[in-house]
Image (cartoon, rainbow, N blue to C red):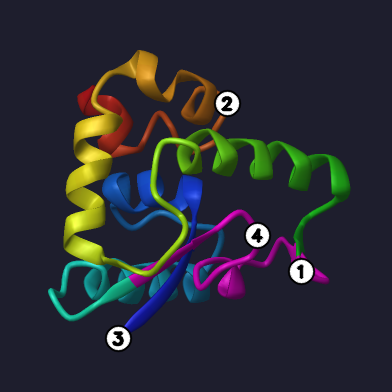
Amino acid sequence: MKLVLRGHHLLCLKGFQGYGYDEAFVRNMVDINAKRKLDTTTVTLTNSADDICKACPNLNEGICENEDQNKRIVGMDEEVLKKLDITEEQNAIELFKKVDLIFNTKESVCEICSNCMWHEKCLFYRKL
């Protein structure tokens, strides 16, 4: 199984608990979250629309909502991606272990998560 995930979605998946924009988005997120936990899944990292975005009602011609919103989200991606190897496909379980080691305090995710509309419900953010 292969997944394409944008940088900040690595953190979103860690905190996902069933909330989303609509039912289709939530179903897709549940499916991807289950796949990323399989030892046969690999992940290619990106800073653009990914497998999660495909089900998002805010995706418009490959960008999130509008250009300003998209720039903010790409910035969130870049904050995550600059701390990871993005040159090749990675085993999902190993990748998420790295994420756990790197992003383990509120300070380590401040620039990424503090303005997220989900951060108050996010299990990942709340446990930091």
Name which of mark 3 and mark 1 comes first in the sequence.
Answer: 3
- Between disc 2 and disc 1, the foreground one is 1
- Horizontal placement of 67 versus 124: left or right? right
Name which of mark 1 and mark 4 comes first in the sequence.
Answer: 4
Q: Residue furthest left?
A: 39
Where in the figure is residue 93, as x and y percent of width and height?
17, 61
The amino acid sitting under disc 4 is: Ser
SS of the residue under disc 4: loop
SS of the residue under disc 3: loop
The amino acid sitting under disc 1 is: Gly
Residue in view at x 53 percent, y 22 percent: 111
| Disc 2 residue crowd, few under 14, some 14–19, many 20+, Cα 10 Å | few
SS of the residue under disc 2: loop
Residue in view at x 83 percent, y 71 percent: 61
Where in the figure is residue 126, as x and y percent of width and height?
27, 26
The amino acid sitting under disc 3 is: Met
- Do tag 1 and tag 4 residues touch (Cβ < 8 Å)? yes
Residue in view at x 57 percent, y 74 percent: 55
Q: Quadrant of the C terminus?
A: top left
How many angstroms separate mark 2 from mark 1 (CA)? 22 Å
How many angstroms separate mark 3 from mark 4 (CA)? 20 Å
Label of residue 62 in the image: 1
Q: Residue furthest top?
A: 107
Residue identifier under label 3: 1
Q: Which residues are magenta?
A: 43-62
| Disc 3 residue crowd, few under 14, some 14–19, many 20+, Cα 10 Å | few
SS of the residue under disc 1: loop
Label of residue 18 in the image: none
Name which of mark 2 and mark 1 comes first in the sequence.
Answer: 1
How many angstroms separate mark 1 from mark 4 (CA)? 8 Å
Residue identifier under label 4: 48
Residue identifier under label 2: 115
